[in-house]
Amino acid sequence: MRSFASDNNSGVHPRILQAVMEANKDHAVGYGDDPWTAQATERLKEFFGEEAEPFFVFNGTGANSVALQVVTQPYNSILCAQTAHINVDECGAPGRMTGCAIVPIATPDGKLTPDLIRLRLVNFGVCHHSQPKAVYISQVSELGTVYTIDEVRAIADLLHNYNMYLHMDGARLANACEYLGCSMRAVTVDAGVDILSFGGTKNGMMMGEAVISFRPELNERLSYIRKQSAQLASKARYLAAQYLPYLTDDLWLLNAQRANAYARRLAETLARHPQIHFTQKVESNQLFFTLPTEALRKLQEKYFFYMWNEETNEARFVTSWDTTSEDIESLEQTLEEIFNEK
């Protein structure tokens, strides 16, 4: 069933599938000592710089949990937006695996700012309080908004003054870069990000992520923590092989361009109906909006999608790399039927 529920529901790009099949033709040494992992590592260094050290893992929750363990001790605290994935959607895994206090901060648009963070940078050296050590940001945010390069750099500069780390969850990094018109390096390591969870499953890949360290002092810890966190794949080549086509001929960017373009077209479709009100700016492939109760009920009869706020009838639509014109046209027809019923 096609829907606008999530880019997790989309298929795998044929070039990605072909790469996995190619990696399956013969035997290879396990646990990352294979040619595909070596090639993917070099490709990622081309994108993020020689200082980048990628460690391939199974999934996004694993990537975030591993990355945050690397930059913290159990007596530390991790600051994030109240809507952040690690605070809402990961069943407490980062908190459990790090032992840290997760400190959520209310934001109007899902994005942290230096001013919001600065208020929580207190009680350093006081043993009665968790010690702030890391900030987690999502790019794109959980509300579909995008951090600019300057916004990321301002947060990083603040944290580095306090000997803290900035972790970026880049599950939709490609969509953010398409919107900003910048490289992935420009909005990550060049902007001061210390460690990155870099995924592609929302943008045409099948599975897996790469935890990428930009700080040499973290690399040895990353190796052991990945293993201890059950995130080291024995047949690692199937994770790494996907990044070869993904980072070739701008496939990552082309997929994101398609998803973002259809999100803009979808926004135009929704905006034709004055009963629909957007609650966030449309800056990526996620759209947040409210609509009347009866219209919502009828829309749910035809489409599966997630409610963001039941009390206010706020829904979320997400476009994908494989969204089609037919998908948009079908929704257009449905909305016309809903709002023009006599």
Image: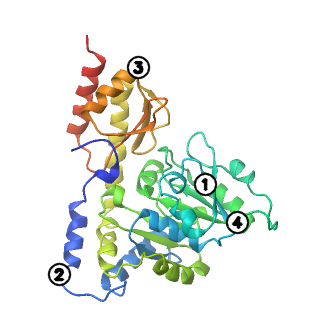
Quadrant of the rendered structure where residue 2 is?
Answer: top left
- Residue most extreme to the left: 25
User: Which mark, residue 8?
Assistant: none
Residue 132 visible in the picture? yes
From the viewer's perspective, is the residue at label 2 or at label 1 nearer? 1
Front-lying residue, 237 or 62:
62
Q: What residue sits right under mark 2 in the picture? A: 25
Q: What residue sits right under mark 1 in the picture? A: 80
Q: What residue sits right under mark 3 in the picture? A: 274
Badge 3 vs badge 1, beta-carbon distance below 8 Å: no
Does residue 141 lie above or below 198 as drawn?
above
Front-lying residue, 226 or 254:
226
Q: Residues within 10 Å of mark 2 (few under 14, many from 20)?
A: few
Q: Residue at x 24, y 27 (%)?
A: 334
Drawn side of residue 342 relative to residue 287, left or right: left
Say whether disc 2 or disc 4 marks the residue closer to the N-terminus.
2
For numbered disc 1, what is the local secondary structure?
strand
Say whether disc 2 or disc 3 marks the residue closer to the N-terminus.
2
User: Which mark, residue 160?
Assistant: 4
Work out how far the residue at label 4 is from the one at label 1, CA to CA, in angstroms.
16 Å
| Picture coordinates of residue 243, whole percent (x, y) | 34, 70
Say whether disc 2 or disc 1 marks the residue closer to the N-terminus.
2
For numbered disc 4, what is the local secondary structure?
helix
For numbered disc 2, what is the local secondary structure?
loop
Q: Residue at x 55, y 84 (%)?
A: 220
Say whether disc 3 or disc 1 marks the residue closer to the N-terminus.
1
Work out how far the residue at label 2 is from the one at label 3, CA to CA, in angstroms.
55 Å
Q: Residues within 10 Å of mark 1 (few under 14, many from 20)?
A: many
Q: Residues within 10 Å of mark 4 (few under 14, many from 20)?
A: some
- Residue most extreme to the top: 342
